[in-house]
Image (tube, rainbow, N blue to C red):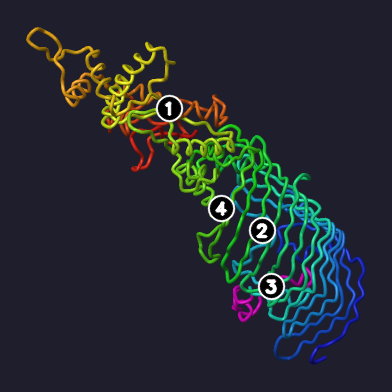
Amino acid sequence: LRPLAGTLRVAARDLVIVPLQPYFTEYVNALVSSGAVSADGRLRFAVPDRGAPRVTWKGRASIADFAAVTKEASSELLRWKSLAFEQVDFDSEPLTVDIGSIALASFYARVILSAEGRLNLRDVLVDRSAGEAPAAGAAALPSPAAEPAAAGAPPAVASAPPAPASAAPPRNLRVGGVQLTDGNIDFSDFFVKPNYSANLTGMNGQISQITPGQAGDLELRGRIDQTGSVQILGQVNPLADPLFLDLKADASDIDLPRLSPYSGKYVGYGIEKGKLSAKVDYKVENRQLTAENNIVLDQLTFGEKVESPDAIKLPVLFAVSLLKDRNGVIDVNLPISGSLDDPKFSVGGIVLRIISNLIVKVVTSPFTLLANLAGAGGAELSWIGFDPGRSTLDATALKKLEAVAKALNDRPGLKLDLAGRADPAADRDALRKLALERAVKTQKLKETVSGGSDSTAIDQLRIEPQEYEKYLALAWRAAKFDKPRNAIGLVRSQPRAEMERMMLAHIEAGDAELTRLASDRAQQAKDWLETTGKIPGERLFIAAPRIGGGGAAGADDGAPVARPAPGATPATAAPAAAPVSRVDLSLK
């Protein structure tokens, strides 16, 4: 017959696939162990003298009880109870595919990421790009004996346009809907050491109608390792060129210890316990990815340190203490964006970089985080200032300590070091003036007590201007230093300014006094945090006092500073605006 043409009514039931394996075994790296094909419809074909043959099919087709294993190890790869294509309308010229619905039921897939970082499903189809062109043999169903003729395909076939020209889906393509029922995806990652595995079960969902110009509504739900749950909602269009998706996923109650191989490799610590919940929003449009990730880690507890060359070199444990609230919960948002055309783009790499940036931010500016927690945004909580010569807490200091206490109560994993400082100039001068003031007040206190009045704390006594010179003279005469005398040896009275000068010159205000002042300041702050702020004493540590803005006790300003303990914020990191008369706070 010229041209060859025909119409066939097809009604096939349970045609076993296994005997047909020789026809396709060289194209796939898998062996079909079971499966039966059924089809019901009308097949039309026409082979003209010139031009491409035309084939049409209207009807339905299904593959039931399918199972396939890997060629190498004969391990289970794919299986399903039923894969059905309903209301199929296919035409090869022009290429048109219209499928009323696709239903996949009771399916299983074994997904493996190899030690080389390659997914096993990518290798199911044999790579025949080395020049073997099966296209000639694919035009008809040859017998095994006819296969050698396919190798001698004419040059026109061999030089056909490569894959990129046909990579995009045909424009005349429609899928009315996809139904997934009772799915199971068994995943293993041999790329990380130790290996990771996850079992997704009870996968049920559906996708509404999809065409190259219309995204389908996606709804997918399942379980992770029998304890966690996952839900994915949104729109997706795998037929679009470029790809389009707009998805919101919600995962909850996922046991973190199962992710320990990843935390060991990339964070440097295994995970002892904890649960993960996440809400993510991913959108891909015009090959641009934008995503929001809300991650909640409940009771995250790291285990032993893992030596890994890929682990971030940052104080992770300290960052966790900063981020974990009083209920043991870490709640963070991680935005992601990038171009899919960027050869360096990878979602995993971006997530790791964002996590690293988050850790850097919190460990380098921990008091900014604490200020935000305490509702004191903008306040500098890394130091508490004092008036020169004083160790009493003023209103500004108390307000800062209140914010610190509130934040520490919300971050029970943090400990606080308090290092008092004294200014070798301002505090030394102020200490002398304060000692003079107290000496004058002591004389009034002696007079008051001798007169029968109640004793009053010296610092609370008030010296009236008209009585100041009287008590100054008494203090001057009582001071133990040589004084000017007259001809007969009696102490000669001096003007007020001279008495003050002489007393100030003989008042000791050396490093010992400055060190004591610095210690008193730290003690005052610690006592307030412990008694009023309700911070347990075992979380508060008084560090060695320091004289000057950068040295240790007994050293002048500019002396070397001892390094803080690993993971702690340096006590000397106060901003330039901080007074030297202060208490430095550092977290660990």
Front position in the image: 583 or 567: 583
Q: Quadrant of the N terminus?
A: bottom right
Residue 156 highlighted magenta (yes or no): yes
Which numbered disc, 2 or 1, marks the residue that appears first in the sequence?
2
Residue 118 highlighted magenta (yes or no): no
Does residue 265 lie above or below 168 as drawn?
Answer: above
**Circle 4 residue:** 351
Which numbered disc, 3 or 2, marks the residue that appears first in the sequence?
2
Front position in the image: 278 or 546: 546
Single out the mark in the foreground, 3 or 2.
3
Q: Residue 239 got which mark?
A: 3
Which numbered disc, 3 or 4, marks the residue that appears first in the sequence?
3
- Work out how far the residue at label 4 is from the one at label 1, CA to CA, in angstroms: 41 Å
Q: Which residues are magenta?
A: 142-166
Q: Position of residue 515 (x, y in %)?
A: 34, 23
Which numbered disc, 2 or 4, marks the residue that appears first in the sequence?
2
Dot 2 crowding, Cα within 10 Å, few <14, some 14–19, many 20+: few
Farthest-out residue, left = 487
Could you say whether the residue bearing mark 1 is in a helix, strand or loop?
A: helix
Single out the mark in the foreground, 3 or 4.
4
Q: What residue is rendered at 54% in x and 50% in y?
A: 352
Does residue 245 lie above or below 114 as drawn?
Answer: below
- Work out how far the residue at label 2 is from the one at label 4, CA to CA, in angstroms: 27 Å
**Circle 1 residue:** 522
Q: Are marks 3 and 4 in contact (CB under 8 Å)?
A: no
